[in-house]
Structures are given as C-alpha cells and as structure tokens.
Image (tube, rainbow, N blue to C red):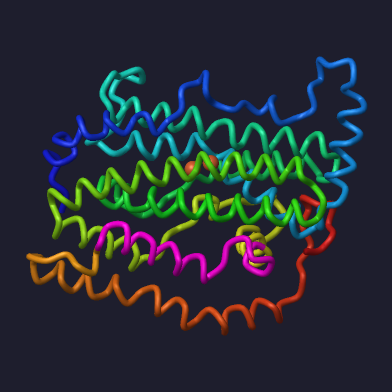
Amino acid sequence: MIDPAILKSIETFVEGQLPLLKSVKDSWQPHDLLPNTRNTSWKKELVEFRRQAATLSDEVLVVLIGNLVTEEALPSYQSWLNRISEIRDETGASPTPWAQWIRGWTAEENRHGDILNKYLYLSGRVDMRSVEITVQHLIRNGFDLKSGNDAYKSLVYASFQERATKVSHANTGRLAEKCGDSTLGKICSFIAADEARHEEAYKRFFGKVLELDTSNAVIAFASMMRQKIAMPARLMSDGISADLFSQFAIVAQRIGVYTTRDYAGIIANLLDYWKIPSLSGLTAEAVKAQDYLCGLPATYLSKADRIEEVLASLPAEPFAWIFGRTA
Ligand SMILES: [Fe+2]
Ligand SMILES: [Fe+2]
C-alpha cells in the first residue's frame, strides 16, 4: 500500500532534483548531430553521413529501429505518469514539482525519437514506411506496465527502465562505432547520457520514498520484480509479424545490446543504490520481499548461459523494417 502523503511530502525534494533536467539552452538538439540541410555543403555532408550508415549490419539496424519505435511511443509514457493520481499534472501546465518533472522529462525524451527517426530516414537503409506503421500500431496498442497506477511501483519501473534504455542505447552506439558509423555512435551516446540523468532522478525519488516508508517501498519493489519488468514496446506490430517484439528482443540479446545479464545487472545496481540488503526494522512481509530481491541477480545470472544457447540456436527471422531481410 502506498501512502499518498509521502509523495506530497517529498515535493520539495523533487524540486531539488529538477536541475537533473538540462535547460533548453544547454540541451543538444537533433539538428546539432545531423547533416545541416541549410549548409551549402549539405550534399557532401549527406554523402558522408550515408557512407557511414551503409556500414551498419542488419542486426544493428533492427535493434536501432526497435529502440526508435520504443522512444516514439512517448505519448503512452507521458499519459502513464499522468494516470498516477499523487504526481500527475492536474492542469497540463501545473507548477508543482512533480508536474514540472513530468513535462521536462517528456520534453527531453521527445528528442530521442526525433533524432533516431531523422537518422533512419536520411540513412536510406530501412523501409521507413514499415517503421512508421510500427510506431502507429504501438501507440494505438498502448503500454501497460502492470503497476496498477501505484506511485511506488511506477518509480521502481521508471528507475529500472531508464537504466535499461541507457544500456541499450550505449551498446547500440558502441556497435555502430565498430561497424564504422561514428555519427550514429555519437547520437546513441548523447541519448544514453540523457537516460543516465533520468535514471539518477527516478532512483533518487524512489530512494526518498524508501527512506520515509521503507517497508511499503520494499514490498512495492519486490512486487514489481515478481511480475517482471514489462518492456514498453511489448505491443509493437508491423501488421505482418506475429510477435515482432520478441523477434526484435532476440536480435538485441544475440548481439549484446540488451541481455539477461543486463537485466540481472540492473537489479543488482538498484539493490546496491537503495542499499536494500542492509535495510533493517522492516515488517515481516517486507523482510520476505527483501530476501526475494537480494536473491534475484543470482537467479537471472544462473539462467543466462542457457538462454544464450537457446537464442543462438534460433533461426534468423525476416523483418519488414529491412525489406524482408533476416536478422
Ligand atoms: Fe529515451
Ligand atoms: Fe528514458
């Protein structure tokens, strides 16, 4: 059970974390990292941009598209935060710290889908119409993180998910660099740096909740992990594949963009950041939740080898995103 008064009482704390969002003046914009179509040298810039993009493997293209589709469903994520009654933006332009956070976070996130979309369009490497269809389907299908609009569980989810996106963007960028696309490498590292600030903010918010309502917060954390973290783009569809998300997730796992080991590593990081193993004075139910949480990284790691073997044995699947080629 959450205590609504806790969320209210940490408003000043939340306000103190707002500088984790960058001012618009200090933020990068997609145009800073893409060929400048106003320059007289734009053709030359575009030729070089495409030369680099031509080096990307089909696997990297598939995970990049999956990352883009995930980012483009931002309307679903903003509406999720606004369903949580204790923190939502009541008017749409409310001055409360929580509302300022939600809008500022959304405004930063919006650049992620924007730049990846422009990158893919300019690259000429993918079936952009199929990608756009997937985005439209995903937003129509929605996203249920199964938190029941519980504020504590939602903060756990956001902490986990920001770190997960940081990991996958950073790994995608490293692979792009390796292929020979330093432009995409830089784009992914800029996005990952934003995700890192967001991760830090959500971890601090939940850390404060933990400090003030420890047992209930630990129980919420465990309950979120028991049902597993539902990926935000789980309901993506290109209108053709029966389970597009799984196909994308298999490629992401195979090429090391987001793996079972990463999942275990994120849980371990959260346990450590929130000092879960050393919390004391918990209720009996919270002690059970604490024990369960502390064993989780080892549980996932013990399955990682077997999962990798199985995934390696699966055939490559065709993706409409890349004109039916397999990955
Ligand atoms: Fe993002
Ligand atoms: Fe994010």
Position of residue 214 measured from the top left corner of the image (x, y, whole percent): 15, 56
Q: Nearer the viewer, residue 136 or 106?
A: 106
Q: Bounds of the magenta span? A: 252-275
Q: Which residue is drawn at 54% across and 26% down?
A: 27
Q: Is residue 272 magenta?
A: yes
Q: Which residue is drawn at 25% across and 50% down?
A: 207
Q: In which quarter of the image is residue 47?
A: top right
Position of residue 3 measured from the top left corner of the image (x, y, whole percent): 13, 45
- Location of the C terminus (image quadrant): bottom right
Q: Residue at x 30, y 19 (%)?
A: 94
In this rendering, position of residue 71 left or right of residue 254 = left
Q: In which quarter of the image is residue 53?
A: top right
Position of residue 322 measured from the top left corner of the image (x, y, whole percent): 81, 52
Q: Nearer the viewer, residue 171 or 299?
A: 171
Q: Residue at x 81, y 34 (%)?
A: 122
**Relative to 232, does residue 215 appear above or below in the rendering?**
below
In this rendering, position of residue 127 left or right of residue 297 = right
Position of residue 300 measured from the top left corner of the image (x, y, whole percent): 44, 76
Q: Is residue 289 magenta?
A: no
**Relative to 106, does residue 186 appear above or below in the rendering?**
below
**Relative to 9, does residue 176 appear above or below in the rendering?**
below
Classified by dominant secondary structure, the portion drawn in magenta counts as helix
